[in-house]
Image (cartoon, rainbow, N blue to C red):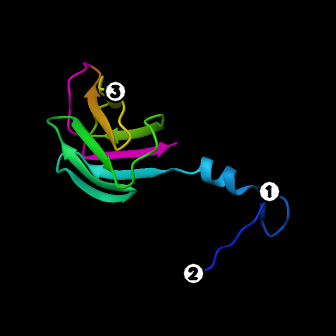
């Protein structure tokens, strides 16, 4: 196996520069798209599994744990015509798992057929 060591990465036109650290820090460290009603993963990166913890409650388990739990996530979900929101549980964040909760405007937990998450660290 070969190793490529560079200080700068530039596009072919020479107009865009990035360092390897900028690329490493700026890309998603995990992402997933799954059906929360059926608890099935459609596609993912660095996610080993999801756990169904009850209606609208899911644990996303990372394949490779983060060095700590100081990550940020963004998500989206939908279910027919209902407006739903994603939040985290009151549990302290974990380096190997993201616990999410999906609820409607009345704060009632709901299963969503279409959940997407992206995690940055």
Q: Report x, y in % for residue 20.
A: 69, 57
Mark 2: give few (<14), some (14-19) or many (20+) Cα within 10 Å: few
| 112 magenta-colored | yes
Q: Is mark 2 on a helix, strand or loop?
A: loop
Considering every residue shown, the one lying at the far left of the view is 54
The magenta span reads 106-121
Q: Report x, y in % for residue 48.
A: 30, 56
Mark 1: give few (<14), some (14-19) or many (20+) Cα within 10 Å: few
The circle on residue 1 is: 2
> Mark 3 — residue?
92
| 1 magenta-colored | no
Q: Answer yes or no: do the residues labelled 3 and 1 have beta carbons within 8 Å? A: no
Ranked by sequence position, the earlier of labels 1 and 2 is: 2
Q: Is mark 1 on a helix, strand or loop?
A: strand
- Say above or below: 45 vs 52: below
Quarter holding the N terminus is bottom right
Ranked by sequence position, the earlier of labels 2 and 3 is: 2
Q: Answer yes or no: do the residues labelled 1 and 2 have beta carbons within 8 Å? A: no
The circle on residue 91 is: none
Cα distance between the residues tagged 3 and 1? 38 Å
Task: Give residue 19's quadrant in the image.
Answer: bottom right
Q: Report x, y in % for residue 71.
A: 48, 37
| Camera-side mark, 2 or 3 | 2
> Mark 1 — residue?
17
Cα distance between the residues tagged 2 and 3? 40 Å
Considering every residue shown, the one lying at the far top of the view is 106
Mark 3: give few (<14), some (14-19) or many (20+) Cα within 10 Å: few
- Say above or below: 39 vs 110: below
Q: Answer yes or no: do the residues labelled 2 and 3 have beta carbons within 8 Å? A: no
Q: Report x, y in % for residue 120.
A: 51, 43
What's the residue at 20%, 46% (across, down)? Answer: 51
């Amino acid at each position: 196996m070969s190793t490529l060591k560079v200080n700068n990465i530039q596009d072919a036109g020479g107009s865009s520069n990035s360092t390897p650290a900028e690329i490493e820090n700026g890309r998603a460290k995990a992402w997933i798209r799954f059906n929360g009603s059926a608890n099935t993963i459609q596609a993912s990166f660095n996610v080993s599994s999801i756990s169904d913890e009850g209606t609208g409650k899911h644990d996303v388990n990372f394949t490779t744990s983060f060095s700590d739990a100081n990550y940020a996530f963004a998500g989206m979900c939908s279910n027919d015509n209902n407006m739903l929101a994603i939040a985290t549980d009151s549990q302290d964040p974990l380096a190997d798992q993201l616990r999410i909760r999906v609820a409607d405007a009345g704060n009632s937990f709901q299963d969503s057929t279409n959940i997407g998450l992206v995690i940055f660290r």
